[in-house]
Image (cartoon, rainbow, N blue to C red):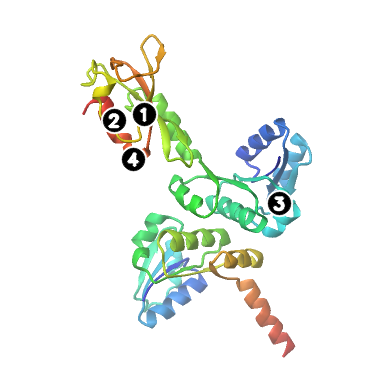
Amino acid sequence: MYIIVVGGGRVGYYLTKALLDEGHEVLVVEKSAIVCESFTDLLGSICFRGDGCEAATLAEVGTARADMLIAVTGDDEDNLVACQVAKHKFNVPRTIARLRNPQRENLFKKLGVDVTVSSTNIILEHIEEEVPTHPLTHLLEIRDKGLEIVEVKIPPDSTTVGKPVKELSLPPGSILSLIIRKERKPIVPTANTIIQAEDQIIAVTKPESEETLRITLRGA
Amino acid sequence: MKIVIMGCGRVGAQLAGLLDAEGHAVTVLDIDSYSFRRLPPEFNGTALIGSGADEETLKKAGIEEADIFVALTQGDNRNVMAAQIAKHIFNVPRVVCRIYDPLRQELYNTLGLEAISPTTVFVRILKEKLES
């Protein structure tokens, strides 16, 4: 694949390295001459000096034949414009933008950016996972389907301990996929599976049903 | 009419002053309070510190009831993003933004954004002057 990376910061560098290792044709567009030079020293001549938001620059690097453009500068505005120019002027099939402000996810999607990656959200999710008392942890978001995979831990004093799954009224669209027991044994829950203390339940749910799911599984 | 202007530079401040004098309800946004010194002393509108690329700030500026939004910061991309937020998230009836880069301005015009490139406009005026 021919992939254009806009922004040669730390994210841009490691991304480019990984994409090159996978055998893709990669070109980095970067404003700073010094950064471009260090790219050339480390990875070969794959860095083009220029503004990745400018149609003229993108035309020069052959964006029209690119399969993907990934904008990873530190500026949300710049990433948005680079993706929009690529999408609407050069018909790049897939555009990916790095986002600082997670509130802008919907805006970017609405404006034609195919995928957004919010570093803030990713950091938050990872910290959540490490906080042992957190009742519900986000494990994975299933993009474009409006679903997510979450983990709920059952504390010993939970009112649902000892109840079979069929007695729980799960919110619509939510499915219990897996229960991991104390002895690290994973089981696929059935209607008759009894909830036990310290169970880790992996469930598929909708973001808006999260709260209901947590209460259903752990008791109010 | 209710008008929100983002960016209180020379253009933003002068436009705000004129529209305010005509009796419109004007709110000017800028990330630097020092910029508000450019507003005329008789300015009766609202000057608000904050970024127009931030939805919360826009709400505070009354974007939900605004008839017009104008993006006039120094950054083309900032203007583009704020204008698209105003147009697509808050459905402001009229959105105008400044884009210095003529190529970018053309692209966003075709995408339905009312964008003006001062570069193109000024070059045209200069050329006309030189030819007359």
Q: Earlier in the sequence, mark 1 or mark 3?
A: 3
- Are the numbered discs 1 and 2 placed on the same chain, yes or no? yes
Are discs 1 and 2 less than 8 Å apart at CB? yes
- Secondary structure state at the residue bearing disc 3: helix
Name the amino acid, label 2: Leu
Name the amino acid, label 3: Thr
Q: Quadrant of residue B102?
A: bottom right
* Percent coordinates x, y for residue A219 in the rendering: 22, 26
Q: Earlier in the sequence, mark 4 or mark 1?
A: 1
Are discs 4 and 2 less than 8 Å apart at CB? no
Q: Tell me the residue that label 4 is attached to.
A: A208
* Distance of label 4 from label 3 (alpha carbons): 39 Å
Q: Tell me the residue that label 1 is attached to.
A: A175
* Percent coordinates x, y for residue A53 in the rendering: 63, 55
Please report, as a chain letter, where disc 3 is located: A
Q: Residue A63: which disc?
A: 3
